[in-house]
Amino acid sequence: KDILSLYPETEDTPLGARPLWLIKKAPDMNAELLTVLVRLTETGDFNYHEAVKKIAEGLMGYQYLNPESELHGMYFCWESTWHNWGNTQAAALMAAYRLTENPACLESVRLWADHFVPFVLTNNFPWEITVHPDSTYTLTPYPQIAYGINSMYQGIKALADVTGDPKDIKRSEEIFAWFTGKNTAAIPMYDPGTGRCYDGIDDAGSVNYNSGAESTIECLLAMQRADSQ
């Protein structure tokens, strides 16, 4: 509540005005909070409609809007950086749209899906992207981990479930295919015999065959979402 009291204040940055009412100015962290608040409100036992509205608006305020850039539509995770792991803003905004029916949430995710998702697919799920004040950017290609892939998958799948648009469905399938072997290592990351998921791809020909809880849980959440329709 204390941080939301700053709504609708913003601060100027080299990449434009940014909301001041998000916890620690961290969109990735606030996306997780937004998802939880939506689900709590949907139980009927809590009413976080106002917080959901403001946090969703804050996440949209961290969307990179530059039609001249191939990163147009990207959601910053921290300051001027997007990172693959935990980039759940699109999924959180779709959850907010489900609760509030605010078309701005849907339009924001639509922009992300039409512009940034194709960039991510073309560039094989980069690890991190930092945008500089002159709009150039630095891209770190590896590693790739299940937490990052599922974060994007949940967002595009939620959009596809709402729109039924063939291009959204196709993109969701392309992202999901990382788990089944359509990746730069050409190795299935999911082992159906054990239900585990490998920890990631360290570079084009190197798979980390460890299987931690995070990797397996994120993979199984993706499998569960894929089977939900």
Image: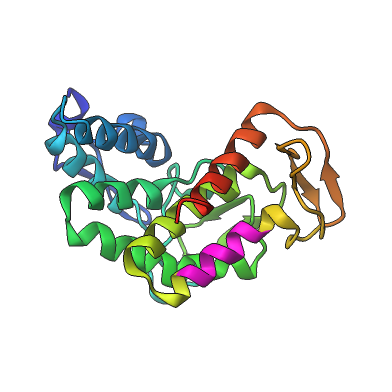
The residue lying furthest to the right in this view is 205
Q: Is residue 46 left or right of residue 70?
A: left
| Residue lying at 53% horizontally and 53% vertically, measured from the top left | 226
Magenta segment boundaries in residue numbering: 169-177
Q: Is residue 221 left or right of residue 102?
A: right
Specify the quadrant that holds the N terminus.
top left
Residue 40 forms part of the magenta stretch: no
Tell which of 6 and 32 is nearer to you.
32
| Residue lying at 77% horizontally and 48% vertically, measured from the top left | 201
Q: Determine which quarter of the picture holds residue 85.
A: top right
Most frequent secondary structure within the magenta stretch: helix
Tell which of 67 and 31 is nearer to you.
31
Q: Determine which quarter of the picture holds residue 48.
A: top left
| Residue lying at 62% horizontally and 31% vertically, measured from the top left | 214
Q: Is residue 48 above or below residue 169?
A: above
Residue 27 image offset from top left, x and y in percent:
37, 41
Q: Is residue 225 left or right of residue 158?
A: right
Tell which of 123 and 190 is nearer to you.
190
Residue 105 image offset from top left, x and y in percent:
25, 57
Q: Is residue 141 visible?
A: no
Q: Determine which quarter of the picture holds residue 10.
A: top left
Residue 223 image offset from top left, x and y in percent:
58, 47
Residue 45 image offset from top left, x and y in percent:
16, 24
| Residue lying at 57% horizontally and 54% vertically, measured from the top left | 129
Residue 176 forms part of the magenta stretch: yes
